[in-house]
Image (spheres, rainbow, N blue to C red):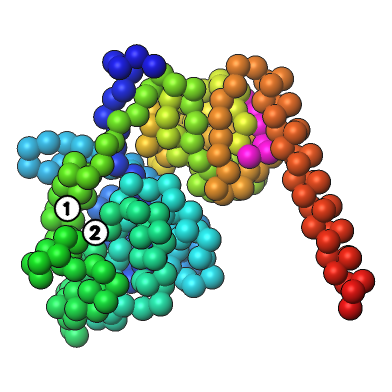
Amino acid sequence: GDEADWEARPPVVTVMGHVDHGKTKLLDAIRNTNVVAREAGGITQHIGAYQIVTELEDYERPITFIDTPGHESFTAMRARGAKVTDIVILVVAADDGVMPQTVEALNHAQAAEVPIVVAVNKIDKEGANPAKIRQQLTEYGLVAEEYGGDTMFVDVSATTRQGLDELLTAILLTADASLDLRANTEQDPQGVVIEGKLDKGRGPVATVLVQRGTLRQGDSIVAGDAYGRVRSLLDEHGNKLKEALPARPVQVVGLTSVPRAGDTFLVVEEDRVARQIADRRQARIRNAQNASMRKRISLEDLD
Ligand code: GTP
Ligand code: NA
Ligand code: MG
C-alpha cells in the first residue's frame, strides 16, 4: 500500500507468570479496575485484553495489555499469549520466587523471540527478596541491566502502586528501542481471536485483536470456521466502537457460531464469500476429525 497508510500503533504487551504472582492485580492497578475481585476463586481462567492510555510526564500513549492465566492447566493460553504479543511482562512475586509457570512463560516468550520485561511484584511484602529473583533468572538467560545484562527488571507492588510508572516507562522504552510498531490501516483487516464465548443475550461473541487494517461495524468477517456480519464492536468497557484500528482488542458480535481462541480472522467483500470460506473450513475440520478417527480405529485393530 501507500507509504502514508502506515501508522504507529500501540505495543501489545502480554502479562505472564506463575499462578497468583499478581498479574491481574497489577493490571487492575494500572487500569484502576478490580477484575481480581470478580474472578471465581481468584484464579484467572480466560485471557483478558485491554487498552489503556498512559499518562506519563511528557506524553500520552496507548498500550494494549493481554492478561493470561498462571494456573498450570493453561499452557495453551500462555503459548498463544506469547505468539500475539510484542513484549512479555514476566511477573514474579518477590516473596515466592521463580516457579514452574514462571519458567514455562519465559520459555514461550523466548521461543517466540519476544522481548521480556521482568516485573518483580509484591515488594511490599515481608520476605520480599527482589535481588534473589534477579539471581534466579540469570540461570534462564535473563540478566538484569544493573548486573551487566540487557533485561529490564522493575520492582513493583500492585497493592501500594509502587513502581507502576517505572514499569510503563520500561514497556515504552522496550517498544521504542527494539520494535517497529507500525501497521497499515488501509489493508484488508486481519487479526486473531483471543477468546470466544456464547453469550446468553448476544449470541456468539469473539474477543479479537486487530493486527492490520481497520475492522468496522458492518464488515463481513470469517473467524476460524465461524462467519457473519459485524453487528457491533465493543471495547473492554462495553462501549460501542465504529471501528477498531491495529492493536485494538474488541468484542465482535454478529458471528453465527463461536470461533476458537487462536483462530485468525479476515474480512471479505460479501457475506456469501464469508459463508463459503467458513463452509470450506468446516468441511476440512470434519475431514481431519474423520481421518483421525479412522486412524484411531485402525490402531485399535492392531491391539
Ligand atoms: P492467576 O491469574 O490466577 O495466575 O493469578 P494472578 O497472577 O493474576 O494473581 P492475582 O492478581 O490474582 O493476585 C493473587 C493474590 O496476590 C491476590 O490476593 C492479590 O491481592 C495478591 N497480590 C497481588 N499483587 C500484590 C502485591 O503487590 N502485594 C501484595 N501484598 N499482594 C498482592
Ligand atoms: Na489469581
Ligand atoms: Mg490473574
Position of residue 251 in the picture relative to residue 6 (left or right): right
Query: What is the number of the mark on residue 115?
Result: none
Separation of marks 1 and 2 at Cα, in angstroms = 7 Å
Residue that mark 1 sits on:
170
State whether residue 94 appears in this view.
Answer: no
47 within the magenta span: no
- Above or below — where is 284 with respect to 112? above
For the C terminus, the quadrant is: bottom right
Query: What is the number of the mark on residue 117?
Result: 2
- The x, y position of residue 128, in whole percent, is 19, 80
Point out the residue furthest to the front here.
302
Q: Secondary structure at mark 2?
A: strand
- The x, y position of residue 96, in whole percent, is 29, 81
For the N terminus, the quadrant is: top left
- Above or below — where is 227 with respect to 49? above
Point out the residue furthest to the right here.
301
Asked whether 236 or 8 is in front, the reply is 8
Cβ of mark 1 under 8 Å from ligand 1: the answer is no
Tell me the magenta residue range: 224-229
- The x, y position of residue 93, in whole percent, is 27, 74
Asked whether 2 or 185 is in front, the reply is 2
Query: What type is the residue that disc 1 sits on?
Result: Ala
Work out whether mark 1 precedes mark 2 in sequence or the reverse, and give the earlier one: 2
Point out the residue furthest to the bottom here.
127
Task: Check contact, mark 1 vs mark 2: CB within 8 A.
Answer: yes
Position of residue 268 in the picture relative to residue 152 (left or right): right
Position of residue 130 in the picture relative to residue 210 (left or right): left
Residue at point 42% right, 35% down? Answer: 211
- Above or below — where is 99 with respect to 254? below
